[in-house]
Amino acid sequence: MKKIIITATAITSLFLSTSVFANNELSENAIKHFTKETEAMTAFLDLSQSQSDAILVAKIDLEVANLKLIELYGRGSDRHLQARKPHWQAYQKAMTAVVSKEDQKRYQQSK
C-alpha cells in the first residue's frame, strides 16, 4: 500500500513539474526509471514523501539539462563535460540537502 501511495505521489509531482512536462523532454521510460530508482532509495533510507519528491526533481532536472547539452555539444565531448559541471554540482547539492553522503553511499552499496 505504501508503495502505491509513493508511486502515485511521485507521478503527480512529475506532472506538476513544469520543467519536465511543459516541453515533453523526457521519454516515458526515463521517467519510469527515475521514479523506480527514487522509490527504491525512499524505501531503503525510509525517506519522507517531500524528500523523495526533491530527489526525483533533482534527477529529472539533471537529465533534462544533460540531454540539452548533448544536443548542443555531442555526448562525452570536452565541451559537453564542461557545460555539464554546474548542473552536476546543483544535482549533488540538492541530493546532499536531502540525504547525507554516508546514506547515499550506503544505498549505492546495497544495490
Image: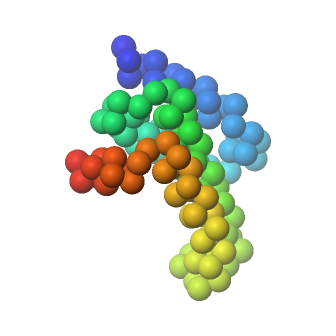
Percent across and percent down for residue 9 are 54, 23
Q: Which colour scheme is used?
A: rainbow
| Quadrant in which the N terminus appears | top left
Q: Which of 10 and 32 is in front in this view?
A: 10
Residue 13 against residue 23 in the figure, above or below: above
Residue farthest to the left, as pictured:
110
Decide if residue 44 is on the left or right side of residue 42. Answer: left
Residue farthest to the bottom, as pictured:
78
Q: Is residue 73 visible?
A: yes
> On the image, which quarter does residue 15 sit in?
top right
Decide if residue 59 is on the left or right side of residue 80. Answer: left
> On the image, which quarter does residue 54 sit in?
top right
Percent across and percent down for residue 45 are 33, 36
Please report the residue visible at 63 percent of the width from the left and 51 percent of the height from the top. Answer: 61
> On the image, which quarter does residue 85 sit in?
bottom right
Residue farthest to the top, as pictured:
1
Decide if residue 43 is on the left or right side of residue 29. Answer: left
Please report the residue visible at 50 percent of the width from the left and 27 percent of the height from the top. Answer: 49
Residue 35 against residue 12 in the figure, above or below: below
Please report the residue visible at 64 percent of the width from the left and 67 percent of the height from the top. Answer: 86
Please report the residue visible at 47 percent of the width from the left and 38 percent of the height from the top. Answer: 35
Percent across and percent down for residue 25 are 68, 51
Count of labels shown? 0
Q: Is residue 28 visible?
A: no
